[in-house]
Amino acid sequence: MLGYFLFFFTPYKVIVGDHAKPRRALGFWFLSPVGLFVLVFSGNFLAMHMTDLFYIRAMLFLNVLLMGVAFLFTGIVYVIFMYRAFFL
């Protein structure tokens, strides 16, 4: 649950804080998407240690959904990052 909280809190804090100046498009914007990828990969390792097939499938389904969100969110952050770096 902490990962989901940080997924939303980190970009919010970056945008409303003083470090979101247009010329300061830094790589720490990618911390939230990286956290989602870590959640996905740790969920895969957790699924390997489960014994019930239902829970394994549920965990893998959740990991696929999170992977889709992570790729989408990474693309959005990348576009914002490049826009800030090149045009502002």
Image: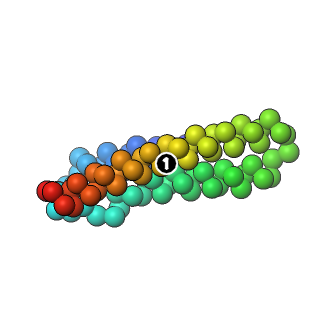
Residue drawn at x 83%, y 39% is 53
In the picture of the structure, the residue carrying the numbered disc 1 is 70
Q: Nearer the viewer, residue 85 or 32?
A: 85
Quarter of the image containing the C terminus?
bottom left
Q: Within 10 Å of the Cα at label 1, are there few (<14), some (14-19), or many (20+) other Cα atoms?
A: many
Residue placed farthest to the right in the image?
A: 51
> Is residue 23 left or right of 29 when viewed as pictured?
left
Disc 1 residue type?
A: Ala
Residue 28 in the image: state x and y as whole percent. Answer: 35, 61
Residue drawn at x 50%, y 54% is 35
Quarter of the image containing the N terminus?
top right
Colour basis: rainbow
Residue drawn at x 64%, y 55% is 42
Residue placed farthest to the left in the image?
A: 88
Residue 8, located in which quarter of the rendered image?
Answer: top left
Q: Is residue 80 visible?
A: yes
Residue 20, located in which quarter of the rendered image?
Answer: bottom left
Residue 6 in the image: state x and y as whole percent. Answer: 44, 48
> Is residue 43 left or right of 24 when viewed as pictured?
right
Residue 46 in the image: state x and y as whole percent. Answer: 72, 52
Would you place residue 34 above or below residue 8 in this image? below
Q: Secondary structure at mark 1?
A: helix
